[in-house]
């Protein structure tokens, strides 16, 4: 890593702490010694449906419990650029297993605009590390909701139209596969006890639900 990039990451970490999702990062999950987090081990699928969707969206049947996922939480990265690998590195610097989100949607500054990246937690169907308010003793949100992070500081500007289209495509897939009603697609800030503006004031959940219902 060159010096400039190091300082950008350092600054990003500071910014995320101030404006991003600090309470979700207070209690990091413990390490899993048997499986280094940075080795993603994409598994050969055992579900024929996987061929219908982008790689990694359909988890292996051997680890998937369809009744587990009860909601979707939308986040932003609170920084202008980056991708899943950058967030993975940041989260590991904090002593986490690796990236806490299940999915990341790039904005063209660090990854191709609208690209949906799949995190290792989703591929293994492990609990997330994206939402744990102080008042949440049982870690419900990380255990039972799917975390999607839009790259960008969406307190300052809107997601790109490619990000918005990709978000809808992904959310539709997840809703259908796990029978998640629209009212359970929420922003991080909507979680009781969450002290954050995440996913940013330019992300409207009512608009997302409306666009989903209209098939836009
Ligand atoms: Zn968040």
Image: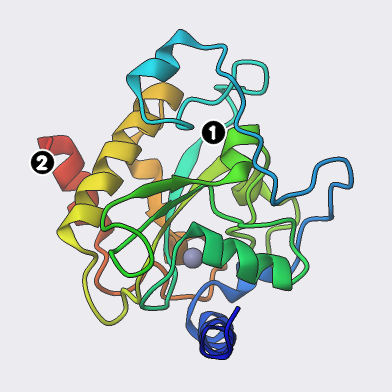
Residue at disc 2, secondary structure: loop
Image location (x, y in percent) of residue 92: 71, 65
Dot 2, how many residues are within 10 Å of its Cα: few (below 14), some (14-19), or many (20+)? few
Which residue is located at x 48 percent, y 32 percent?
Answer: 56
Q: Is residue 53 left or right of residue 21?
A: left
Where is 58 relative to 27, above or below? above
* Figure quadrant of residue 204: bottom left
Query: Which numbered marker is on residue 69?
Result: 1
* Figure quadrant of residue 176: top left
Most distant residue in the right direction: 33
Residue at disc 1, secondary structure: loop
Which residue is located at x 16 percent, y 58 percent?
Answer: 161
Query: Which numbered marker is on residue 216?
Result: 2
Image location (x, y in percent) of residue 199: 38, 67
Where is 114 relative to 49, above or below? below
Image location (x, y in percent) of residue 55: 43, 30
- Of residues 210 and 41, which is closer to you in this image? 41
Whether label 1 lies within 8 Å of ligand 1 gets the answer: no
């Amino acid at each position: 890593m060159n010096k400039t990039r190091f300082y950008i990451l350092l600054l990003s970490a500071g910014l995320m702490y101030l404006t991003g999702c600090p309470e979700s990062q207070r209690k990091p999950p413990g390490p899993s010694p048997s499986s280094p987090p940075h080795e993603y081990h994409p598994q050969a699928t055992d579900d024929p449906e996987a061929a219908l969707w982008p790689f990694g969206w359909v988890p292996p049947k051997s680890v998937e419990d369809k009744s587990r996922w009860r909601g979707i939480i939308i986040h932003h990265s609170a920084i202008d650029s980056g991708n899943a690998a950058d967030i993975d590195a940041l989260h590991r610097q904090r002593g986490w297993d690796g990236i806490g989100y299940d999915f990341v949607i790039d904005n063209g500054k660090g990854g191709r605009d609208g690209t949906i990246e799949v995190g290792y937690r989703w591929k293994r169907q492990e609990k997330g590390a994206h939402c744990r308010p102080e008042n949440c003793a049982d870690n419900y949100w990380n255990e039972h909701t799917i975390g999607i992070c839009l790259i960008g500081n969406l307190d300052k500007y809107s997601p790109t139209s490619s990000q918005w289209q990709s978000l809808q495509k992904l959310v539709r897939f997840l809703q259908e596969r796990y029978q998640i009603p629209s009212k359970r697609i929420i922003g991080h800030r909507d979680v009781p006890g969450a002290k954050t503006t995440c996913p940013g004031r330019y992300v409207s959940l009512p608009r997302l639900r409306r666009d989903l219902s209209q098939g836009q």
